[in-house]
């Protein structure tokens, strides 16, 4: 799977994130047990996981669930940090935006059609 995008420790386990963003629109998570063996491998950019994110979710919980974002933007005047993920939902390319307030809590979860693909579809 190549080099991990991010590595985290969760108890005795090591969790390795393998991002395929932006073009692959997937983030795989490999959980390695204390014995060094692969315990699980799953794709995290799913509609089910996005549905778990609610206003008030902590940033570290969101990152553990989905993995590292494709892009992070700061909006100082709005006092927001926005994480962008590229994913598929309903078989269509989407952009997922997570807005965080300065206290590190999710304030808004928004998924829209990927503008690059939407614009392409209108010219057909």
Image (cartoon, rainbow, N blue to C red):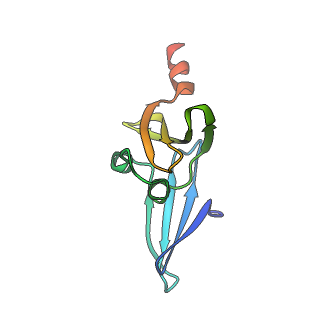
Residue at the spot x=45%, y=40% of the render?
88
Q: State left or right for residue 64 relative to residue 1.
A: left
In front: 111, or 74?
74
Residue at the spot x=55%, y=61% of the render?
17
In front: 85, or 120?
85
**Residue 124 in sight in this render:** no
| Residue 80 x %, y % | 55, 39
| Residue 39 x %, y % | 43, 75
| Residue 94 x %, y % | 47, 34
Vertical position of residue 20 compared to residue 82: above or below: below
Residue at the spot x=59%, y=42% of the render?
22
Vertical position of residue 96 compared to residue 117: above or below: below
How many callouts does the rendering have?
0
Residue at the spot x=42%, y=39% of the render?
109
Q: State left or right for residue 122 relative to residue 4.
A: left
Taking the view exactly as shown, the residue that stands out farthest to the top is 123
Tell me the quadrant of the picture where the N terminus can be found: bottom right
Taking the view exactly as shown, the residue that stands out farthest to the bottom is 35
Taking the view exactly as shown, the residue that stands out farthest to the right is 3
In front: 1, or 78?
78
| Residue 106 x %, y % | 44, 45
**Residue 28 in sight in this render:** yes
- Determine which quarter of the picture holds residue 43: bottom left
């Amino acid at each position: 799977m190549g080099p991990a995008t991010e590595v985290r420790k969760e108890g005795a386990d090591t969790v390795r994130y393998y991002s395929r963003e932006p073009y692959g629109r997937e983030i795989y998570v490999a959980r390695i047990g204390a014995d060094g063996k692969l315990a699980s491998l799953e794709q995290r950019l799913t509609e089910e996981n996005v549905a778990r994110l609610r206003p008030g979710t902590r940033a570290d919980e969101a990152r553990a669930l989905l993995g590292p974002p494709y892009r992070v933007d700061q909006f100082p005047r709005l006092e927001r940090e926005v994480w962008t993920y590229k994913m598929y939902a309903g078989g269509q390319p989407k952009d997922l935006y997570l807005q965080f307030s300065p206290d590190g809590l999710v304030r808004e979860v928004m998924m829209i059609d990927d503008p690059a693909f939407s614009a392409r579809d209108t010219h057909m």
